[in-house]
């Protein structure tokens, strides 16, 4: 069993984790597949992580998600003698006794020592794996110890604190070495602490995303940009949104476009905003579809086109977003860009979880005139009165009268 990572794994780690904005993630993925097939257990381990979704690998690589294959690869990495594979399998609950028996290590502690040696040699991924062994208390199983191993609770807690606290330095080494998501666990460590063993220190988490942004990680650049925008530092926010977008972070071109569409941190440029939204369309980003649909709805930055507006917002809606349901409702109500369908309009309106006067106005029209539903005058009046003091609402209310006994009817 080698105590060094192969050149293939080292290259893949560079392109997948340490410098993800190179755009070589797909090639690195293929490199890992070949190395895994040739018996490289570390390659099998890293490949398994790549198949586990955005919590374990940058979404910008566009890797497929396949939990079943990931588990298969983790088990394979254990059998192939990867110390990292053993620890990752342990961490993810994929090291049952029958798999543990197949590892070519005398014990979990021996596997940990090999991983620790890789970490001490400077490999950031190994440093992250070691840090997790401390952070998530896996050291208990590795060292085969529990509460009964200690004479009293105080001794046990002292042992826990000594080991858990080791994660901090290892996470920082991994983070500085290029593993961006080491910052996620550092953030949790600082903001939440660990039960009554490690006290929270939220002040130490304050600049984590800024640090990651400066290291060049697109996802941290996007998160830091959001923080800056929330703090009112709009020009700086736009700068980091652009950095994230140019680095390939999914959805960040949409944020750049949103800034230019609304004039956040820059002069309004609706035509450029549309170009930014279009860059995120091939990735299926629902925000891009919604905002581009809005641009077509109003004809800002592009010629007005209700058909395209309806198509784009419908795609986002089918993808789980209700952001554009008012626009879909209005298009359906008036038959703009789609067939006129009052029942569909009402369904869209009822998906809204926010108040907007024009939505209440349309509901009032639907209930008061019986458009696709049974006439319900009381409900119509309630909706129209809620809509407030707008000319369209006043005009519609003129079609109703109130009897001496307080009952409303349509004139």
Image: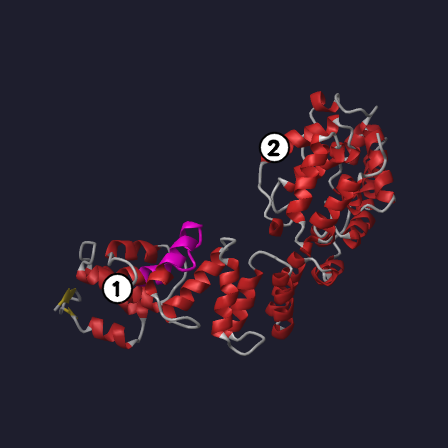
In the foreground, 132 or 23: 23
**Is residue 38 one of those drawn in magenta?**
no
Q: Position of residue 72 (x, y in %)?
A: 64, 29
Q: Secondary structure at mark 2?
A: helix
**Residue 149 as seen in the image, left or right of residue 392:** right
**Residue 105 as seen in the image, left or right of residue 67:** right
Q: Is residue 196 visible?
A: no
Instruction: Calculate the distance from the C-alpha at mark 2 to the C-alpha at mark 1.
Output: 49 Å
Residue at image position (62%, 66%) is: 242
In the foreground, 189 or 294: 294
Placement of the C terminus among the 4 image quadrants: bottom left
Q: Is residue 364 above or below residue 183?
A: below
Q: Which mark is residue 334?
A: 1
Q: Is residue 336 visible?
A: yes
Residue farthest bottom in this picture: 267
Q: Is residue 326 above or below residue 397?
A: above
Q: Sort mark 1 into few (<14), some (14-19) or many (20+) by Cα contacts within 10 Å.
A: some
**Residue 111 as seen in the image, left or right of residue 98:** right
Q: Which mark is residue 69?
A: 2
Q: Position of residue 350 (x, y in %)?
A: 34, 55
Q: Position of residue 47 (x, y in %)?
A: 68, 38
Q: Secondary structure at mark 1?
A: helix
Placement of the N terminus among the 4 image quadrants: top right
Q: Is residue 160 above or below residue 370?
A: above
In the foreground, 5 or 263: 5
Residue at image position (41%, 63%) is: 293
Q: Which residues are magenta?
A: 311-330
**Is residue 318 one of those drawn in magenta?**
yes
């Amino acid at each position: 069993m080698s105590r060094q990572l192969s050149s293939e794994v080292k290259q893949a780690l560079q392109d997948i984790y340490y410098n993800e904005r190179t755009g070589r993630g797909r090639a690195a993925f293929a490199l890992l597949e070949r190395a895994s097939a040739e018996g490289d257990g570390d390659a099998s381990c890293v490949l398994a992580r790549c198949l586990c979704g955005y919590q374990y690998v940058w979404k910008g690589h566009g890797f497929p998600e396949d939990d079943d294959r990931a588990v298969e690869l983790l088990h394979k990495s254990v059998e192939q003698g990867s110390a990292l594979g053993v620890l990752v399998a342990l961490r993810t609950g994929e090291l049952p006794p029958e798999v543990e028996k197949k590892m070519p290590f005398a014990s979990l502690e021996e596997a940990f020592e090999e991983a620790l040696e890789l970490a001490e040699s400077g490999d950031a991924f190994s440093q992250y794996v070691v840090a997790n062994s401390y952070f998530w208390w896996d050291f208990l199983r590795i060292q085969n110890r529990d509460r009964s191993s200690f004479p009293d609770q105080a001794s046990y807690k002292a042992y826990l604190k000594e080991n858990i606290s080791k994660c901090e330095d290892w996470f920082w080494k991994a983070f500085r070495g290029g593993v961006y998501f080491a910052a996620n666990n550092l953030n949790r460590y600082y903001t939440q602490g660990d039960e009554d063993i490690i006290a929270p220190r939220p002040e130490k988490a304050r600049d984590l995303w800024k640090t990651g942004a400066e290291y060049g990680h697109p996802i941290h650049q996007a998160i830091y940009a959001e923080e800056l925008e929330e703090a009112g530092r709009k020009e700086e926010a736009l700068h980091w949104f652009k950095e994230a977008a140019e680095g390939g972070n999914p959805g960040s071109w949409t944020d750049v476009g949103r800034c230019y569409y609304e004039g956040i941190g820059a002069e309004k440029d609706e035509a450029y905003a549309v170009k930014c939204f279009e860059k995120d369309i091939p990735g299926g980003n629902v925000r891009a579809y919604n905002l581009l649909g809005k641009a077509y709805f109003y004809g800002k930055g592009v010629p007005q086109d209700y058909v395209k507006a309806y198509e784009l917002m419908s795609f986002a809606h089918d993808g789980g977003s209700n952001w554009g349901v008012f626009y879909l409702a209005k298009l359906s109500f008036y038959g703009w860009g789609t067939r006129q369908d009052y029942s569909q309009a009402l369904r869209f309106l009822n998906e809204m979880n926010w108040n907007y006067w024009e939505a209440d106005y349309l509901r009032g029209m639907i209930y008061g005139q019986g458009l696709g539903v049974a006439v319900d005058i009381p409900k119509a009046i309630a909706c129209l009165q809620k809509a407030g003091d707008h000319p369209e609402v006043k005009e519609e209310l003129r079609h109703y009268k109130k009897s001496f006994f307080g009952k409303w009817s349509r004139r």
